[in-house]
Amino acid sequence: MTGYPFTWEHGRNSDGWVESRLDRVFTNVQWRTRFSNSTAEVLGFSTLDHLPILLAVKCFVDQHHAHRFRFENTWLREAGCRTLISDIWQLSPDTDVEGKLVACRTALKSWGTNLRLLHKAEMDESLAIMARLRGSRLQVHMDEFLLAKSRFFHLLNPREIFWKQRAKQFWLKEGDANTRFFHSAASARKQKNTIVKLLDDSNVWHDKNSGLEEVMSGYFTSLFTSHDCNSEPVLQCVPLLVSHDQYASLLAPYSCDEIKSAAFSMKIDKSPGLDGFNPGFF
């Protein structure tokens, strides 16, 4: 087991500060033979008096998926995000909304990548400081340790928003150490929504390697395609409950206020559109 040599502490920053290695990882010979590349590491940060042990089980093949753009609600806490969007909107007065959204998507994708790398570097630096000073009894080192720990957990806050955005648990608020719940909810939601295979009209199963997308596309194309039929007898049985004024109101063009009201009434964690922007962007 690698990492910090102790897993438990009590009384930090006091004369009675003690550290001990209380936690272990137990395996047998069969397990170690099957997962010979697995590692166990004592992590250098925790909100409790016990340090967590990360067990990395190497028994799977990494899969690389193409990542499409998705507006992250964590960006709303960054001052640079609003400035970037405002600059693009003002510097392109002759461009339509769709063109501005395309420009924002391109700029935000690059900006978000740089921000993620910056935060990762700052987290790695905080972890390095904590690892270097964890066992020191000097007051200046203990103060520096607590400062690095505070900075590290501040950088962890966006992860809670990240997983809340994907969990779709609108009744629960972030800010109360709910990251584990949001992560579990998001994982369960992804598993539930994943379509592995479908049965077509000929009772043939299709997966992603044998025409799954074609089955989906064909189903909805057929569903929303009109067919020759006489619906007049059915319509004659439907009572007329909408007045002429209501009918005219329903057919009237949408106003800007109606569009704004509908968009701004949506929860910011709702799923994004095809362009990658969710209600939180607007």
Image (cartoon, grey):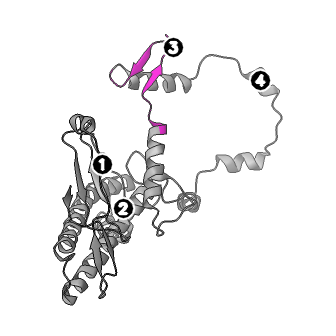
Q: CA distance from mark 3 to mark 2?
A: 43 Å
Does 49 sit above or below residue 116? Answer: below
Q: Quadrant of residue 137?
A: bottom left
Q: Nearer the viewer, mark 4 or mark 1?
A: 1
| Amino acid at the residue labelled 3 | Asp
Q: CA distance from mark 4 to mark 1?
A: 71 Å
Does 91 sit above or below residue 262? Answer: below
Q: Which mark identifies residue 234?
A: 4
Q: Give the crowd class for mark 2: few <14, some 14-19, many >=20 residues within 10 Å.
A: some
Q: Is residue 272 left or right of residue 256?
A: left
Comes first in the chain, label 2 or label 1 = 1
Residues at discs 3 and 4 in contact (Cβ within 8 Å)? no
Give the SS element for disc 3.
loop
Q: Nearer the viewer, mark 3 or mark 4?
A: 3
What residue appears at the point 19 percent right and 70 percent down from the top-left corner? Answer: 131
Q: Give the crowd class for mark 4: few <14, some 14-19, many >=20 residues within 10 Å.
A: few
In the rendered structure, which segment of residues is drawn in magenta?
A: 192-209
Q: CA distance from mark 2 to mark 1?
A: 30 Å
Give the SS element for disc 4.
helix
Q: Identify the residue under disc 3.
A: 201
Q: Is residue 208 magenta?
A: yes
Q: Identify the residue under disc 1.
A: 26
Q: Identify the residue under disc 2.
A: 159
**How far from the left and from the top, in percent, is residue 249?**
69, 51
